[in-house]
Amino acid sequence: MPAEHDFFLPDPEGLSPSAAGYFGAFGGKFIPEALVAAVDEVAAEYDKAKADPAFAAELNELQAHYTGRPSALTEVPRFAGHAGGARIFLKREDLNHTGSHKINNVLGQALLTKRMGKTRVIAETGAGQHGVATATACALFGLECTIYMGEVDTKRQALNVARMRMLGAEVVSVTSGSRTLKDAINEAFRDWVANVDRTHYLFGTVAGPHPFPALVRDFHRVIGVEARRQLLERTGRLPDAAVACVGGGSNAMGLFHAFLPDTGVRLVGCEPAGHGVATGEHAATLTAGEPGILHGSRSYVLQDDEGQITEPYSISAGLDYPGVGPEHAYLKDSGRAEYRAVTDDAAMQALLLLSRTEGIIPAIESAHALAGALELGRELGPEALLVVNLSGRGDKDMDTAARYFGLYDTDAQVAADSEDTADTAEIERDAT
Amino acid sequence: MSGNIQLLSDTLAAARAEDRAALIAYLPAGFPTVEGGIEAVKAAFDGGADVVEVGLPHSDPVLDGPVIQTADDIALRGGVRIADVLRTVREAHQATGKPVLVMTYWNPVDRYGVARFAAELAQAGGAGCILPDLPVEESEAWRAAAGEHGLATVFVVAPSSRDERLARITAAGSGFVYAASLMGVTGTRASVGEQAADLVRRTKAGTDLPVCVGLGVSNAAQAAEVAGFADGVIVGSAFVKRLLDAAGDEAAGLAAVRALAAELAEGVRKRA
């Protein structure tokens, strides 16, 4: 049993991927030869770090006094009143320094970067939360930092672009492909191949080539370990379900992992259904994708019949990704976890509801999990106990939300994206 | 029908017998159109290429620079399918009798079906396949299918590859070894990386396979320089750029491809 001040909690033996990086049929290492040495170096350094008490001590110190761990667990009864009477607790990763769970992984990998003697860090970002966390750690450790972000996302998450630049990072707006997270990752890989000698690719989710899925998950395992302990202390029992949003899947894996042996706890991932899975405009990879290879590992991907990756869509930049971490693919196929799709509209209504019932404005990503919890609570009934990972706060999303709900005073400010005005007004009435 | 791995080996051996490097051109299928792409491959052969790699365009070409990304994008927007790629291989090979390989990323092959792709590529007269994001550790299924159908499996080695990995990769590969001249994505460069000669030397220490150098080679002088230490010179982006620059004027594009192939063919015979 880890002590309360232990925040580096790598996976216990037996829940690790195979030596080749496979979780069942998923994972592996599909990378160009030019990156094999660098990826192997990350794996070797991580193995050394796991065995080095000084590494854990340094990360624990940072997590306690820089991130602000442990994060709070907040019961939300007024919100839960809309969920069939279930009790709902939120794991408050939004209260971490930088405003999301992303900092857990970033601090761990930044320490690895230092251990490897590399002086430059690159990263991809969708919503900008991983980019902000990475830029933060680079400022803290004096590392050079370049963040790749799709052009669509630099526009809808402009606040985070400014934050990254404030922190001293270079932000590269990526204009290839769908100009979202997938394309940012492509561009980061291209940079890495060319600059691998002095550069660490600080991968932001539980996808990518081995060892990243396991390594990133290990740094986030603290979420579930804390939530499990906090729930037992507060309620005397385990939850009926642990709920989290899934894009690449890092916050969900962080929450789920500590509950894997608790077979009575349902693990529910909420994917972005966008305008509805049936419309084709979504990013619900586990719901609608099929096995394939993207960004270095085999998992579920959104693709056509000849293996071309299809362009995803979600109102949430952080979930707008046609792949997903391989361990999620494994948990889906094994039946241990279940995945459902939540539309833009359902997520936005949940965002508004949590804001107005509890005074907590969640990120649009996390709002997908909240919408899933409302649905799940109604299914499970009033005796149910749910824990939801509130993976990030919504400050970055205020422009999107204000346009969606028509919260700006002047018409001019909403003119750019106002075709949905009628719909959004209706949703606002429904939710209040 | 068996694939043309032997034709590929014979072609590279013939170049060696002439005391020169082979010229290997890369052109994506479906670019600028399927028909135009077929003609471009023929033009490259006509100008003096010994081998052509036909690119199977992918939505996420992580190892390609802006030139080939643009071409892939045009090809995919034009609706190119794997059947078109295979037709490009077939028609180019039938018209010239020369070895044609496919170069692509692993997911399209995996999705299409490894055995099916290998069988159809062999049937089209293909000589083999280069799959730069399929490392040797993950390549067993492909190598089995390629071996069964008489196709070469060309692996890429990089300046960062350590000697023990080079040994493992070259032991698993066939046809030739693709040595990346530098650490980076495809695209033209002002100079050939200094690491290329060292990589070729280290690679040759452990294999009898021909070692051909690609990435960044775009003109006759660079081709001659590389020909001084390698068995083959691979040129991709420079050809694609000729076609992009001639946008809309197909005849001019083909003439430019033919002229570049001729220039490079002269370069590989000069051996700096």
Image (cartoon, rainbow, N blue to C red):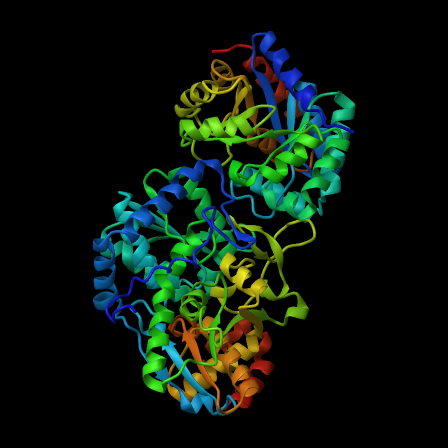
Image side of residue A158 versus residue B68, left or right: left
Nearer to us in this view, A412 or A302: A302
Horizontal and vertical percent position of residue A123: 39, 52
Q: Is residue A373 above or below residue B51?
A: below
Q: Is residue B170 above or below residue B230?
A: below
Horizontal and vertical percent position of residue A385: 45, 85
Horizontal and vertical percent position of residue A186: 49, 48
> Residue at 26% of width from left, 42% of height from top?
A117
Q: How many marks?
A: 0
Horizontal and vertical percent position of residue A284: 58, 66
> Residue at 34% of width from left, 67% of height from top?
A222
For the view shown, which residue lies furthest in the top direction?
B18
In this view of the protein, can residue A180 be seen by the observer?
no
Q: Is residue A397 above or below residue B102?
A: below
In this view of the protein, can residue A107 be seen by the observer?
yes
- Image quadrant occupied by the N terminus of chain A: bottom left
Residue A429 sits in quarter: bottom right
> Residue at 55% of width from left, 20% of height from top?
B209
